[in-house]
Image (spheres, grey):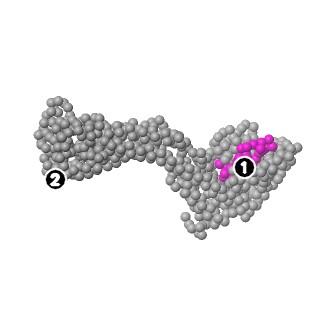
Amino acid sequence: MQTRGELTPASLAEALDHLRSVVDSTSYPLVMPSAAEARESGSALVTQLDDYLIPRLARLDAPLLAVVGGSTGAGKSTLVNSLVAAKVSASGVLRPTTRAPLLAANPADLDWFRRGELLPGLTRTDEPSTDPKSLQLVGVPTLAPGLALLDAPDIDSVVDANRALAGQLLAAADLWIFVTTAARYADAVPWGLLRTARQRGTVIAMVLDRVPPEAAEEVAAHLAEMLRDNGLGAAPLFVVPETRLTADGLLPPSALGDLSSWIGYLAADAETRADVVRRTLDGALAALAPTTASLADAAEEQDKAAETLADRVEIAYRNANRAVAHGVEDGRLLRGEVLARWQEFVGTGELMRTLEAQIGRLRDRIVSTLTGRPAPGHALRSAIEGNLVTLIRGAADEAAETAYTGWQAHPAGAALLSPPLGRAGPDLPERAERLIRDWQRHVLEMVRAEAGDKRALARGTAYAVNATGLLVMVVVFASTAFIPTGAELAVAGGTTVAAQKVLEAIFGDQAIRTLAAKARADLLDRVSALLAEEAARFTTLVEPVPGAAGRLRGAALDVEAARADAALVTR
């Protein structure tokens, strides 16, 4: 962007393009109080930028577009036909009559509207259409160059597409000619749109149609009072009496009176038309700031909700990591099946055999072959794996339940939940088993690396490495001792002490402790990564746009600065 001192009308167009990009790229996916309104408001703002602000700013000298809008049965089409003195727009008693918009302009002005810079989302056609995404263009020589009339669908149509299109067309107008009747001028829907027009700064003219002559003064006075109360007191008010139509289905010229004269004045006076365009354009530009501010507030609410949800997940899985770390270090994994296998491993003498002589390996192989039972070391490794998987699965299940409950208590989180999230992923046990097996292999690799050229370990070959690796794993699960303490130590007896002495002779006591510390840290890192994958089942459901609020506010400030320096203000 250019600096404020260098801004030009061209920079205003650049600022609007940037604002459009920022608004369009900002989403409000979380169910929050402001989300639905922000999505609707953001979409409407992008549409207005595309349909009106950007193309109008590019061509300030383009014909003035007056959109004729109003409620069902207000007589909009008849009014348009009567103003151009030709039956160009279909009218009738069936509702809704106007299914697709019609634009009437002097033939000399049609090229501007045909190019599609204004209302680019509507397909141009020269024939009547029922497609609400089309815009019928009609050349009317009776309408002076410089002014076009667009007959819009009913603002309260029973057809959703018609109502949406009516709002879109009104947002693209330089001038609203708002048509109501003596019977319906106090309806809520028109006044909601009129207040929107006031907020946008759109120039408005009110037409009170089908007014019984005897009630004209009273009804017009009441409507004028309502206009003042709603901040629209400057809007001109034209009264069209209830009257018989001509043979061509048009209002007689006498019924149009001041309205026809006013339209003719606009068409004939380029300076007045330019003033209307600039007033509406500047009003629309001024309305961008509060609209964008509300979008930024909604984006901040999304960020805060996303942060809250992420915090609840982070706390749940941080506690899970702590639970696993505590379970690894407090010795509980040395009990039960692991203890039995440890006792078997030490008590059968396998540890000493594998550490001291090659014959131990041969004897165990023969025994295993004859009995069909795995060597005790294999059973110990399997028991360690099973206990670790149980510990990890319990922590993951508890974390999932905690995160699920935390999200359930938050409106945005509750909308994202599905029952499977309330427990660990179905493939967690399989992934945990794979994690433990990979970790056990890593421990053996660390033992091999630590052994280096120690010949005592080399003479024991792979079996000595495996035995040492198992002992390192046992140390991992004891927080204060090299081997289990208390009752476990008594059961293991002197064989364990002897094994410790052999290992100290090979590695040194501190080396074993260092290996165990490294193995514990590696195990917890692997578990942390696994639990992070579990947490991602929640966090991937929340995809905020970081910094969206700041970008929205910054883009709005750029537009305000460019607007001020381009001097597009009402004079």
Q: CA distance from mark 2 to mark 1?
A: 89 Å
Q: Secondary structure at mark 1?
A: helix
* Residue 123 seen in the current view: no
* Image side of residue 218 versus residue 202, left or right: right
Residue located 55% across and 43% down the image: 31
* Amino acid residing under circle 1: Leu
* Residue 387 seen in the current view: yes
Residue located 23% across and 52% down the image: 510
* Image side of residue 507 versus residue 292, left or right: left
Which of the 4 image quarters holds residue 461? top left
**Which residue position is annotated with label 1?**
194
Residue located 44% across and 44% down the image: 316
171 is within the stretch colored magenta: yes
Q: Which residues are magenta?
A: 168-194
Q: Position of residue 177 (x, y in %)?
A: 74, 50
292 is within the stretch colored magenta: no
Residue located 51% across and 52% down the image: 545
Q: Residue furthest bottom?
A: 5
Q: Is residue 268 above or below residue 74?
A: below
Q: Secondary structure at mark 2?
A: loop
What is the number of the mark on residue 453?
A: 2
Q: Position of residue 267 (x, y in %)?
A: 75, 57
The one nearer the camera, 427 or 276, is 427
Q: Residue furthest right?
A: 214
